[in-house]
Image: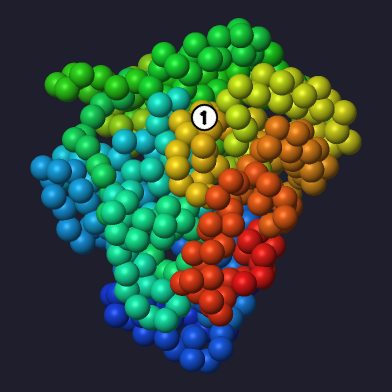
Amino acid sequence: MTRWTNWAGTAAASPLRVHRPRDTAAIAEAIGRTAADGRRLRPLGSGHSFTAIAAANSDAMDLTGWTGIASADVAKGLVTVRSGTTLKQLNAELDALGLAMTNLGDIDAQTVAGAISTGTHGTGARLGGIATQIAALELVLADGTVVTCSADERPDLFAAARVGLGALGVISTVTLQCEPSFLLSAQERPEPLEQVLEGFDQFADENDHFEFYWFPYGKNALVKRNNRLPAGSEHRPLSKLKEFVDYEITENVAFGGLCRLGRAVPKLVQPLGRFASNILSAREYSDTSHRVFVTHRGVRFVEAEFAIPREALHDVFSELRAFVPKLENPVAFPVEVRVAAADDIWLSTANGRDSAYIAIHQFVGMPYREYFAGFASIVGEVGGRPHWGKMHDLDAATLRSRYPRFDDFLRVRKEVDPAGIFTNTYLDRVLGTP
């Protein structure tokens, strides 16, 4: 028996059997054995979801032996990657081909299948999440058949499976629409929060990628603006020393120390938050896109994130700011705000609407339930949709009201997995029992 836990320690399971396939045929064989035994199966991914979406108390599938780029048409930018490949490995292999993903989040530990299945996204008012960059998917269904879906081939399955929660089958390969490698200029600096909020829509629209972090109890936000540079522009990366000092020492070692101090002495959290807000530093550099998108996160935390209509951001953020000082337990971690363009993926958090994303965090080991529940109530007033891989308490009845194509997803699920082989406790809650 293998004990499985996720990165944040918020979910755990003890699978009775772990399959470790190294090709599509072995994936199909494992699914067939599971079905024949009347058991359930969950692919594990890298465990970077904060929910129990990957928890398997019956059979689990470990895809760490099924990685790497399977094929690439560099001229067209079409790259087919095996589902167990982490985004970090994918970025490196794309770089070697002179290609890049159009948009990424700031963590690269997830597998490509896990990232798309949970709706992982970056930021950009004109850009969608990672799933919008998919050209085709190959899945192994509950009956062991291997199918391909795209906008032209089994389009309903494609609309569902691009953010499929692992509920429709095991993704074996993902074909991504990539583009030639490009440089991003990065500008990161502290700015007064009021100024950031006042100019939010302008900043989001005039930058390729825009986000900010607000440290509760502080007056400043850390603002990040990333923009594409013309082909042939010069790399101006951070020096190794500054990169080490800014990211490893300041954002991981020092910030982690402040969080541990606040956890030990909660009354210090508010002054420490103001201190952290006041010592934020500025930096400007340019580098290969994935080196700008991705940031090492060494301090562990728990997280909830909701997508809301972009026009509701100011009201929601105002309520959140008013709510935080009323909490019984203080908040040690910043709030992150991003944006994304509307898409047509059925269970994408940006389905049918331009979205703002608000992510709240708490340092691991510190009380968070009152904070997360209050936040969920605030965003619920505007139809907030929870990130599928981050913490929330919503069930299928509530989620149905927030996703126009929810029942279409369930219809496809019933067609491809009628016996519910790929479900678990989390999916029973958010999708209903098959």
Q: Position of residue 223 (x, y in %)?
A: 52, 19
Q: Work out whether 46 lies above or below 18.
A: above
Residue at point 22% right, 23% down? Answer: 235
Q: Nearer the viewer, residue 130 or 65?
A: 130
Q: Position of residue 165 (x, y in %)?
A: 52, 59
Whether residue 1 can be seen here: no
As drawn, the residue found furthest toward the bottom would be 37
As drawn, the residue found furthest toward the left would be 75
Whether residue 34 can be seen here: yes
Residue 363, quarter of picture: top right
Residue at point 58% right, 12% down? Answer: 196
Q: Is residue 3 left or right of residue 325?
A: left
Q: Nearer the viewer, residue 192 or 358?
A: 358
Q: Position of residue 37 (x, y in %)?
A: 53, 92
Q: Position of residue 341 (x, y in %)?
A: 46, 31
What residue is shown with label 1?
354
Residue 32, quarter of picture: bottom left
